[in-house]
Image (cartoon, rainbow, N blue to C red):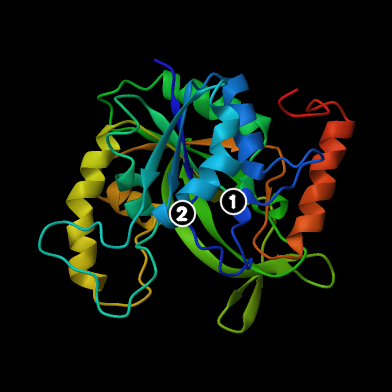
Amino acid sequence: MKPTLVIMAAGMGSRYGGLKQIDPMGPSGETLIEYSVYDAIRAGFDKVVFIIREDFSDAFKEAVGSKFDDKIEVGYAYQELGDLPKGFSVPEGRQKPWGTGQAILACKGVVDDAPFAVQNADDYYGTEAYTAIAEELRNLAVESTDSCMVGFETKNTLSPNGSVSRGVCEVENGYLSGVVERLKIERSAEGVVQFFDAETPVDMTGDEICSMNFWGFTPKFFQALEARFATFLEAEGSEMKSEWLIPTIIDDMINAGETRVKVLSSHDSWFGVTYPNDKPTVVGELQAMHDAGKYPDQLWG
Protein backbone atom coordinates (compact mmCIF):
# COMPACT_ATOMS: atom_id res chain seq x y z
CA MET A 1 0.00 0.00 0.00
CA LYS A 2 1.38 3.40 -0.98
CA PRO A 3 1.68 5.98 1.81
CA THR A 4 0.01 9.38 2.11
CA LEU A 5 1.84 12.62 2.89
CA VAL A 6 0.19 14.95 5.42
CA ILE A 7 1.43 18.55 5.42
CA MET A 8 0.57 20.73 8.40
CA ALA A 9 -0.01 24.23 7.03
CA ALA A 10 -2.44 25.75 9.53
CA GLY A 11 0.13 27.71 11.55
CA MET A 12 -0.24 31.45 11.80
CA GLY A 13 3.43 32.16 11.04
CA SER A 14 3.60 34.75 13.82
CA ARG A 15 7.39 34.95 14.02
CA TYR A 16 7.75 35.03 10.26
CA GLY A 17 5.22 37.80 9.82
CA GLY A 18 2.95 36.30 7.16
CA LEU A 19 1.59 33.20 5.47
CA LYS A 20 4.96 31.62 4.74
CA GLN A 21 3.16 28.50 3.49
CA ILE A 22 2.42 30.31 0.19
CA ASP A 23 5.55 32.47 0.01
CA PRO A 24 7.54 31.80 -3.22
CA MET A 25 11.07 30.53 -2.59
CA GLY A 26 12.23 28.63 -5.68
CA PRO A 27 13.72 30.15 -8.87
CA SER A 28 10.37 29.86 -10.66
CA GLY A 29 8.31 30.97 -7.68
CA GLU A 30 7.94 27.54 -6.06
CA THR A 31 6.92 27.31 -2.41
CA LEU A 32 8.68 24.97 0.00
CA ILE A 33 5.53 22.86 -0.04
CA GLU A 34 6.04 22.21 -3.74
CA TYR A 35 9.48 20.73 -3.08
CA SER A 36 7.95 18.47 -0.43
CA VAL A 37 5.29 17.18 -2.81
CA TYR A 38 7.79 16.81 -5.66
CA ASP A 39 10.16 14.72 -3.50
CA ALA A 40 7.24 12.72 -2.07
CA ILE A 41 5.96 11.79 -5.54
CA ARG A 42 9.45 10.63 -6.52
CA ALA A 43 9.58 8.52 -3.34
CA GLY A 44 6.28 6.77 -4.12
CA PHE A 45 3.60 8.67 -2.17
CA ASP A 46 0.28 8.69 -4.04
CA LYS A 47 -1.76 11.20 -2.01
CA VAL A 48 -1.12 14.49 -0.20
CA VAL A 49 -3.40 15.96 2.47
CA PHE A 50 -3.03 19.59 3.48
CA ILE A 51 -4.11 20.62 6.97
CA ILE A 52 -5.08 24.29 6.73
CA ARG A 53 -7.44 26.86 8.24
CA GLU A 54 -10.69 27.72 6.55
CA ASP A 55 -9.99 31.46 6.69
CA PHE A 56 -7.22 31.15 4.08
CA SER A 57 -8.53 28.04 2.35
CA ASP A 58 -9.32 29.70 -0.99
CA ALA A 59 -5.97 31.51 -1.17
CA PHE A 60 -4.08 28.32 -0.29
CA LYS A 61 -5.90 26.16 -2.81
CA GLU A 62 -5.37 28.70 -5.60
CA ALA A 63 -1.70 29.40 -4.84
CA VAL A 64 -0.56 25.90 -3.84
CA GLY A 65 -3.05 23.07 -4.00
CA SER A 66 -4.17 23.66 -7.58
CA LYS A 67 -0.62 22.99 -8.80
CA PHE A 68 -0.92 19.31 -7.88
CA ASP A 69 -4.37 18.45 -9.26
CA ASP A 70 -2.95 16.54 -12.23
CA LYS A 71 0.07 15.12 -10.40
CA ILE A 72 -1.16 13.46 -7.21
CA GLU A 73 -4.43 12.93 -5.36
CA VAL A 74 -5.06 15.95 -3.11
CA GLY A 75 -7.16 16.21 0.05
CA TYR A 76 -7.81 18.96 2.59
CA ALA A 77 -8.48 18.94 6.32
CA TYR A 78 -9.21 21.94 8.52
CA GLN A 79 -7.76 22.61 11.95
CA GLU A 80 -10.15 24.81 13.88
CA LEU A 81 -9.87 26.08 17.44
CA GLY A 82 -13.37 24.97 18.38
CA ASP A 83 -13.07 21.40 17.09
CA LEU A 84 -12.99 19.76 20.52
CA PRO A 85 -14.30 16.56 22.13
CA LYS A 86 -17.79 16.64 23.60
CA GLY A 87 -17.93 18.46 26.92
CA PHE A 88 -15.08 20.88 26.20
CA SER A 89 -15.16 24.48 25.00
CA VAL A 90 -12.66 27.14 24.01
CA PRO A 91 -11.74 29.40 26.96
CA GLU A 92 -12.73 33.02 26.48
CA GLY A 93 -9.97 35.00 24.82
CA ARG A 94 -8.02 32.07 23.39
CA GLN A 95 -7.04 32.40 19.72
CA LYS A 96 -4.14 29.95 19.38
CA PRO A 97 -4.91 26.47 17.94
CA TRP A 98 -4.22 23.46 20.14
CA GLY A 99 -1.04 22.26 18.44
CA THR A 100 0.13 19.54 16.09
CA GLY A 101 -1.73 16.76 17.90
CA GLN A 102 -5.05 18.41 17.10
CA ALA A 103 -3.85 19.09 13.55
CA ILE A 104 -3.34 15.39 12.87
CA LEU A 105 -6.70 14.51 14.40
CA ALA A 106 -8.29 16.92 11.93
CA CYS A 107 -7.25 14.74 8.98
CA LYS A 108 -8.83 11.53 10.26
CA GLY A 109 -11.17 10.36 7.53
CA VAL A 110 -9.25 12.27 4.85
CA VAL A 111 -6.09 10.18 5.07
CA ASP A 112 -8.01 6.95 4.37
CA ASP A 113 -6.87 3.59 5.67
CA ALA A 114 -3.19 3.95 4.78
CA PRO A 115 0.11 4.63 6.55
CA PHE A 116 0.99 8.31 6.42
CA ALA A 117 3.89 10.69 6.96
CA VAL A 118 3.43 14.03 8.72
CA GLN A 119 5.56 17.12 8.17
CA ASN A 120 5.62 20.90 8.55
CA ALA A 121 4.67 23.09 5.59
CA ASP A 122 7.51 25.58 5.96
CA ASP A 123 10.46 23.17 6.04
CA TYR A 124 12.71 21.62 3.40
CA TYR A 125 13.57 18.02 4.33
CA GLY A 126 15.46 16.76 1.28
CA THR A 127 15.06 13.78 -1.03
CA GLU A 128 16.69 11.26 1.30
CA ALA A 129 14.09 11.82 4.01
CA TYR A 130 11.11 11.01 1.76
CA THR A 131 12.77 7.93 0.31
CA ALA A 132 13.59 6.57 3.78
CA ILE A 133 10.19 7.18 5.35
CA ALA A 134 8.24 5.93 2.31
CA GLU A 135 10.10 2.64 2.40
CA GLU A 136 9.50 2.23 6.13
CA LEU A 137 5.80 3.05 5.83
CA ARG A 138 5.33 0.52 3.05
CA ASN A 139 6.69 -2.12 5.42
CA LEU A 140 4.32 -1.21 8.27
CA ALA A 141 1.09 -3.19 8.53
CA VAL A 142 -2.05 -1.04 8.70
CA GLU A 143 -2.95 -2.61 12.05
CA SER A 144 0.52 -2.02 13.52
CA THR A 145 1.00 0.44 16.38
CA ASP A 146 4.63 1.00 15.37
CA SER A 147 5.72 4.42 14.13
CA CYS A 148 8.81 6.00 12.61
CA MET A 149 10.50 9.35 12.23
CA VAL A 150 13.29 10.94 10.21
CA GLY A 151 15.88 12.72 12.33
CA PHE A 152 18.50 15.25 11.32
CA GLU A 153 21.85 16.20 12.82
CA THR A 154 21.29 19.27 14.98
CA LYS A 155 24.13 21.17 13.31
CA ASN A 156 22.29 20.84 9.98
CA THR A 157 19.09 22.44 11.30
CA LEU A 158 20.23 25.80 12.67
CA SER A 159 19.23 29.26 11.50
CA PRO A 160 21.85 31.97 10.94
CA ASN A 161 19.28 34.55 12.02
CA GLY A 162 18.40 33.51 15.55
CA SER A 163 18.23 30.70 18.07
CA VAL A 164 15.93 27.71 17.63
CA SER A 165 14.33 25.07 19.83
CA ARG A 166 14.78 21.41 18.94
CA GLY A 167 13.54 18.09 20.25
CA VAL A 168 16.77 16.13 20.73
CA CYS A 169 16.24 12.38 20.35
CA GLU A 170 17.40 9.65 22.68
CA VAL A 171 17.87 6.47 20.63
CA GLU A 172 18.30 2.87 21.81
CA ASN A 173 18.85 0.01 19.35
CA GLY A 174 17.50 2.11 16.50
CA TYR A 175 14.29 3.12 18.28
CA LEU A 176 13.33 6.36 19.96
CA SER A 177 13.42 6.16 23.76
CA GLY A 178 12.64 9.81 24.45
CA VAL A 179 12.71 13.40 23.21
CA VAL A 180 14.38 16.15 25.23
CA GLU A 181 13.38 19.70 24.37
CA ARG A 182 16.42 21.98 24.09
CA LEU A 183 15.80 25.72 23.99
CA LYS A 184 17.74 28.53 22.35
CA ILE A 185 20.12 26.41 20.28
CA GLU A 186 22.62 28.44 18.27
CA ARG A 187 26.25 28.63 17.25
CA SER A 188 28.58 30.57 19.52
CA ALA A 189 30.99 33.16 18.14
CA GLU A 190 33.55 30.33 18.03
CA GLY A 191 31.22 28.13 15.97
CA VAL A 192 30.28 25.73 18.80
CA VAL A 193 26.69 24.48 18.82
CA GLN A 194 25.11 25.32 22.20
CA PHE A 195 21.78 25.33 23.95
CA PHE A 196 20.88 27.45 26.95
CA ASP A 197 19.83 26.01 30.29
CA ALA A 198 18.24 29.11 31.80
CA GLU A 199 21.01 31.64 31.12
CA THR A 200 23.86 29.11 31.02
CA PRO A 201 25.22 27.95 27.64
CA VAL A 202 25.77 24.18 27.34
CA ASP A 203 28.00 22.84 24.55
CA MET A 204 26.67 20.21 22.14
CA THR A 205 28.57 18.12 19.58
CA GLY A 206 26.16 19.18 16.83
CA ASP A 207 25.77 15.53 15.78
CA GLU A 208 22.82 14.93 18.09
CA ILE A 209 19.79 13.65 16.17
CA CYS A 210 16.83 15.96 16.50
CA SER A 211 13.23 15.74 15.43
CA MET A 212 12.07 18.19 12.79
CA ASN A 213 8.45 17.00 12.91
CA PHE A 214 8.77 14.42 10.16
CA TRP A 215 6.87 11.42 11.49
CA GLY A 216 5.38 8.23 10.07
CA PHE A 217 2.22 6.59 11.46
CA THR A 218 -0.41 3.99 10.73
CA PRO A 219 -4.15 4.76 11.11
CA LYS A 220 -3.93 3.28 14.63
CA PHE A 221 -2.36 6.57 15.70
CA PHE A 222 -5.72 8.31 15.44
CA GLN A 223 -7.10 6.09 18.20
CA ALA A 224 -4.22 7.04 20.47
CA LEU A 225 -4.78 10.73 19.77
CA GLU A 226 -8.51 10.54 20.48
CA ALA A 227 -7.84 8.84 23.80
CA ARG A 228 -5.37 11.53 24.85
CA PHE A 229 -6.92 14.79 23.63
CA ALA A 230 -9.50 14.95 26.41
CA THR A 231 -6.80 14.24 29.01
CA PHE A 232 -4.75 17.13 27.67
CA LEU A 233 -7.73 19.49 27.72
CA GLU A 234 -8.62 18.53 31.28
CA ALA A 235 -5.09 19.45 32.36
CA GLU A 236 -4.31 22.46 30.15
CA GLY A 237 -7.49 23.39 28.30
CA SER A 238 -8.09 26.54 30.34
CA GLU A 239 -4.76 28.09 29.35
CA MET A 240 -4.43 30.67 26.59
CA LYS A 241 -1.34 29.28 24.85
CA SER A 242 -1.04 25.62 25.82
CA GLU A 243 -0.12 23.31 22.93
CA TRP A 244 -0.63 19.59 22.45
CA LEU A 245 2.45 18.59 20.47
CA ILE A 246 3.48 15.42 18.64
CA PRO A 247 6.82 14.95 20.49
CA THR A 248 5.06 15.09 23.87
CA ILE A 249 2.39 12.66 22.70
CA ILE A 250 4.99 10.24 21.30
CA ASP A 251 7.08 10.42 24.48
CA ASP A 252 4.00 9.55 26.53
CA MET A 253 3.11 6.64 24.24
CA ILE A 254 6.64 5.24 24.36
CA ASN A 255 6.66 5.39 28.15
CA ALA A 256 3.28 3.63 28.22
CA GLY A 257 4.54 0.89 25.89
CA GLU A 258 1.96 1.81 23.24
CA THR A 259 4.32 2.34 20.31
CA ARG A 260 7.84 1.82 19.05
CA VAL A 261 9.29 4.59 16.93
CA LYS A 262 12.01 3.56 14.50
CA VAL A 263 14.51 6.37 13.99
CA LEU A 264 15.52 6.93 10.38
CA SER A 265 18.28 9.41 9.69
CA SER A 266 18.98 11.80 6.86
CA HIS A 267 22.33 13.33 6.02
CA ASP A 268 20.69 16.10 4.00
CA SER A 269 20.61 19.60 5.39
CA TRP A 270 17.27 20.74 6.70
CA PHE A 271 16.26 24.36 6.33
CA GLY A 272 13.18 26.43 6.88
CA VAL A 273 11.83 29.94 7.28
CA THR A 274 11.45 30.55 10.99
CA TYR A 275 12.42 34.22 10.66
CA PRO A 276 11.91 36.69 7.76
CA ASN A 277 15.68 36.97 7.32
CA ASP A 278 15.83 33.22 6.64
CA LYS A 279 14.20 33.68 3.25
CA PRO A 280 17.31 34.85 1.31
CA THR A 281 19.26 31.89 2.69
CA VAL A 282 16.53 29.45 1.63
CA VAL A 283 16.24 31.04 -1.82
CA GLY A 284 19.99 30.67 -2.28
CA GLU A 285 20.02 27.03 -1.13
CA LEU A 286 17.23 26.11 -3.54
CA GLN A 287 18.85 27.92 -6.45
CA ALA A 288 22.10 26.05 -5.79
CA MET A 289 20.28 22.70 -5.92
CA HIS A 290 18.64 23.62 -9.22
CA ASP A 291 22.00 24.71 -10.59
CA ALA A 292 23.53 21.38 -9.50
CA GLY A 293 20.82 19.42 -11.32
CA LYS A 294 19.13 18.04 -8.21
CA TYR A 295 15.91 19.64 -9.46
CA PRO A 296 14.93 20.66 -13.01
CA ASP A 297 15.01 24.32 -14.02
CA GLN A 298 11.28 24.49 -13.42
CA LEU A 299 10.06 22.08 -10.78
CA TRP A 300 7.00 20.96 -12.70
CA GLY A 301 8.39 21.45 -16.23
Q: Residue at x 42, y 53 (%)?
A: 53
Vertical arrangement, residue 231 with respect to residue 44, above or below: below
Tell me the residue that label 2 is attached to.
10
Q: Please, which residue is most extreme toward the top here?
A: 1
Who is closer to the viewer here, 71 or 218?
Answer: 71
Who is closer to the viewer here, 4 or 192?
Answer: 4
Question: Does residue 191 appear left or right of residue 202 in this picture?
Answer: right
Q: Quadrant of residue 76?
A: top left
* Label 2: element kind: loop
For the question of whether residue 258 can be seen, the reply is: no
The span from disc 1 to disc 2 (Cα, nearest Å) is 9 Å
Who is closer to the viewer here, 148 or 229?
Answer: 229
User: What amino acid is found at the position of numbered circle 1 in the picture?
Assistant: Gln
In the rendering, at what x and y percent does residue 15 appear?
Answer: 60, 69
In the rendering, at what x and y percent does residue 242 appear?
Answer: 35, 71
Tell me the residue that label 1 is attached to.
21
In the rendering, at what x and y percent does residue 136 appear?
Answer: 47, 24
